[in-house]
C-alpha cells in the first residue's frame, strides 16, 4: 500500500509530493537536497514547520503586505509601496524580472499609464498578486 509524502527545503518550503510504499518513504530523504515527511501537503497553501520536532505540515499564513494605495500618477515620482514583507520575499515584476526583497518593502514608480501586476511570495505566508494602476 502506498503512502503520501512531501519533499521540502531547509526553510520548510514544499517542493514536491508523491507516494510510494511506506518502507520506501525514508529513501526519498536527501533526493535533490530535500528532506522528506510522510503526509499530504500542497506547496501553494502549506509549508513544513521545521521548528517543531518532528516537523509538521501547516497552512501558510495570510499575506502580510499592505499597499499604500491602488492608483498612482504615471509621472515617475508618485510612489506605490507594499510594506510588511519578510526578509527573502520573492517578487515577480510585471516584466517577468524576479527580485528578492530584504528590507521589508517594495517600491514602484512609472512614467507610462497602465495596470501593473506583481506576484509576491513572502514565504511562509501565502503568495499574492497585487496591482497598481498608473494614470495621467
Image: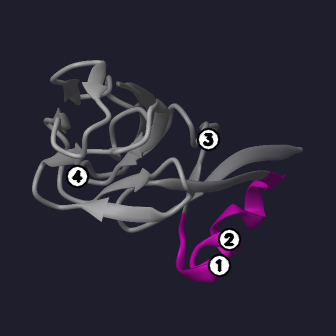
Per the image, the residue denoted by label 2 is 28
User: Reading the chain from its start, which is encountered first: label 2 or label 4?
Assistant: 2
Closer to the camera, 110 or 100?
A: 110
Q: CA distance from mark 2 to mark 3?
A: 13 Å
- Label 2: state its secondary structure: helix
Per the image, the residue denoted by label 3 is 39
Q: CA distance from mark 2 to mark 4?
A: 21 Å
- Label 1: state its secondary structure: helix
Q: What label does residue 78 carry, if any?
A: none
Residue 34 in percent (x, y) is at 54, 72
Per the image, the residue denoted by label 1 is 31
- Label 4: state its secondary structure: loop
- Please say if the residues under marks 2 and 1 sit with CB atoms less than 8 Å apart: yes
Per the image, the residue denoted by label 4 is 51
Closer to the camera, 92 or 69?
A: 69
User: Reading the chain from its start, which is encountered first: label 4 or label 3?
Assistant: 3
Q: How many marks?
A: 4
Residue 132 in percent (x, y) is at 37, 27
Q: CA distance from mark 1 to mark 4?
A: 21 Å
Q: Quadrant of residue 50?
A: bottom left
Residue at position x 69%, y 74% in the image:
27
Amino acid at each position: 500500500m502506498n503512502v503520501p509524502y512531501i519533499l521540502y527545503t531547509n526553510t520548510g518550503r514544499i517542493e514536491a509530493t508523491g507516494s510510494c510504499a511506506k518502507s520506501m518513504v525514508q529513501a526519498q530523504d536527501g533526493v535533490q537536497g530535500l528532506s522528506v515527511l510522510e503526509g499530504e501537503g500542497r506547496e501553494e497553501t502549506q509549508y513544513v514547520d521545521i521548528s517543531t520536532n518532528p516537523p509538521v505540515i501547516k497552512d501558510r499564513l495570510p499575506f502580510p503586505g499592505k499597499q499604500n494605495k491602488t492608483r498612482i500618477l504615471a509621472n515617475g515620482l508618485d510612489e506605490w509601496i507594499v510594506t510588511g514583507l519578510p526578509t527573502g520575499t520573492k517578487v515577480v515584476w510585471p516584466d517577468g524580472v524576479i527580485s528578492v526583497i530584504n528590507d521589508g518593502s517594495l517600491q514602484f514608480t512609472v512614467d507610462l499609464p497602465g495596470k501593473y501586476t506583481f506576484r509576491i511570495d513572502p514565504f511562509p505566508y501565502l503568495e499574492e498578486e497585487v496591482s497598481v494602476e498608473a494614470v495621467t
